C-alpha cells in the first residue's frame, strides 16, 4: 500500500487483471459438471452416438451415471473371439443388458455360437419379446441356433435379421408388423417359405445362401423388394419366382449353382444381375450353351425393366 497526495492506493498484483485491464473474478469453487447436469433424455441422446460397449463404461463416471445407460434404446454387441472365456463373458453381459434395459427398440448380437449357449440366447429372445423390441438381429456364427417358438407369434416385430438360425415353426408365423426380413445361411423348406411370404406387410425380403425351397410365390402387393444371393455351388437346384407386384429385384448367384426361373415379373422396374464363383481358368463355363440359354431367359423375363444393372462377370457372358 502506498500514499499519493493524501490518497490511499492499493497496489494490486498484475495477475488480478486480464490483458484488457479488466479485473478477473476469482472463484473458490471448481467448474460445474455441465454434462451431468443435463436431463436424462439429453444424456441418452448423446449416448446414442456411442457404441454399446462405450455406453456401458459410462456407469463408472459417477453415481449420477451409474444407471443412466440402462435407458438406452439400442443394444448392438458383437464378439469375434473364439476364446471360450471371452465368449462366456460376452454372453453374461448380454444377459444382464436385456434384463436392465427396458426401453429397447433395437437388439443386435453377433457371436461365435455354440449349442451350449442355447438357453442363454432363448432367454435373450424371451426378454426382448416381453419388452416389445421391434428390430432384432441374431448372428450366430458356428453352430446353428433354432429359433424359439415364441418368436413366431411376436406380432410387434418390424425388422428381423437372422444368420445361421434355423426356422422350424410348428404353427403359423404371426409377424403381422414385419416389414424387412433378412435370412442367411440356412435351409428353408417350401412350407416355411409359404408362411414367411404370408406376412401381410412385408416389404423387403433378403435371402442369402439359403436353400431347400423350390418356389417363391409372392402374392402380397406390399412385398416390392427381393434380394437373392447364392455364393455357393449347391448343385442344379431350380427356384421358380412368381412376383406380380415386385418392383426391385437383385440376383447374385454362383454360375454353377442355383438357377432362378422368373415368372410373371413384368412389374419389376429395377433389376441387378451378377455372377460369382469362377476362377480365371473356368471362364469357358460362361459361354457354355446352358449358361447362355439361362441368361437369355433372365433377360427375356426382365425386358420391361426401366433400370438394369449388370455385374462385370454377367457382362462377360
Image (cartoon, helix red, strand yellow):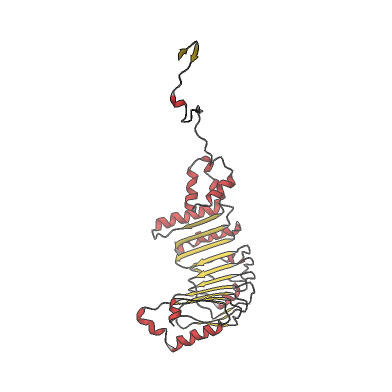
Number of callouts in the render?
Answer: 0
Q: Residue at x 47, y 54 (%)?
A: 92
Horizontal and vertical percent position of residue 315: 45, 80
Is residue 47 positioned above or below 217 on the image?
A: above
**Residue furthest bottom in the image:** 289
Residue 290 can be seen in this image: yes
User: In this view of the protein, which residue sits in the foreground, 143 or 185?
Assistant: 185
Horizontal and vertical percent position of residue 237: 49, 82
**Residue furthest left in the image:** 281
Is residue 128 positioned above or below 199 on the image?
A: above
Horizontal and vertical percent position of residue 301: 56, 83
Is residue 264 positioned above or below 1 on the image?
A: below
User: In this view of the protein, which residue sits in the foreground, 129 or 268?
Assistant: 268
Horizontal and vertical percent position of residue 213: 53, 78
Q: Quadrant of the N terminus?
A: top left
User: In this view of the protein, which residue sits in the foreground, 279 or 197?
Assistant: 279
Residue 70 can be seen in this image: no
Q: Residue at x 45, y 65 (%)?
A: 141
User: In this view of the protein, which residue sits in the foreground, 255 or 299?
Assistant: 299
Q: Quadrant of the C terminus?
A: bottom left
**Residue furthest top in the image:** 6
**Residue furthest front in the image:** 5
Q: Which picture quadrant has residue 191?
A: bottom right
Residue 270 lies left or right of residue 80; in this view the side is right
Amino acid at each position: 500500500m502506498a500514499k499519493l497526495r493524501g490518497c490511499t492506493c492499493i497496489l494490486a498484483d498484475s495477475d488480478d487483471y486480464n490483458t484488457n485491464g479488466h479485473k478477473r473474478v476469482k472463484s473458490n469453487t471448481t467448474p460445474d459438471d455441465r454434462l451431468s447436469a443435463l436431463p436424462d433424455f439429453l444424456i441418452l441422446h448423446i449416448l446414442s452416438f456411442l457404441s454399446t460397449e462405450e455406453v456401458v463404461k459410462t456407469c463408472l463416471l459417477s453415481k449420477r451415471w451409474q444407471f443412466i445407460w440402462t435407458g438406452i434404446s439400442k443394444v448392438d454387441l458383437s464378439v469375434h473371439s473364439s476364446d471360450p472365456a471371452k465368449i462366456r463373458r460376452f454372453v453374461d453381459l448380454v444377459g444382464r443388458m436385456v434384463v436392465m434395459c427396458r426401453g429397447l427398440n433395437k437388439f443386435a448380437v453377433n457371436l461365435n455360437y455354440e449349442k451350449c449357449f442355447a438357453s442363454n440366447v432363448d432367454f435373450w429372445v424371451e426378454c426382448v419379446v416381453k419388452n416389445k423390441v421391434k428390430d432384432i438381429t441374431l448372428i450366430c456364427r458356428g453352430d446353428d441356433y433354432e429359433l424359439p417358438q415364441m418368436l413366431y407369434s411376436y406380432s410387434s416385430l418390424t425388422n428381423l435379421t437372422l444368420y445361421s438360425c434355423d426356422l422350424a415353426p410348428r404353427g403359423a408365423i404371426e409377424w403381422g408388423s414385419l416389414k424387412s426380413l433378412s435370412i442367411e445361411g440356412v435351409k428353408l423348406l417350401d412350407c416355411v417359405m409359404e408362411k414367411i411370404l404370408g406376412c401381410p406387410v412385408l416389404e423387403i425380403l433378403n435371402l442369402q445362401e439359403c436353400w431347400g425351397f423350390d418356389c417363391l410365390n409372392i402374392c402380397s402387393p406390399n412385398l416390392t423388394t427381393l434380394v437373392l444371393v447364392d455364393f455357393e455351388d449347391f448343385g442344379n437346384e431350380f427356384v421358380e419366382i412368381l412376383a406380380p407386384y415386385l418392383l426391385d429385384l437383385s440376383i447374385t448367384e454362383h454360375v454353377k449353382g442355383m438357377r432362378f426361373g422368373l415368372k410373371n415379373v413384368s412389374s419389376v422396374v429395377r433389376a441387378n444381375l451378377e455372377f460369382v464363383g469362377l476362377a480365371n481358368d473356368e471362364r469357358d463355363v460362361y459361354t457354355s450353351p446352358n449358361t447362355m440359354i439361362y441368361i437369355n431367359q433372365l433377360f427375356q423375363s426382365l425386358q420391361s425393366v426401366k433400370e438394369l444393372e449388370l455385374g462385370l462377370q454377367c457382362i462377360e457372358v
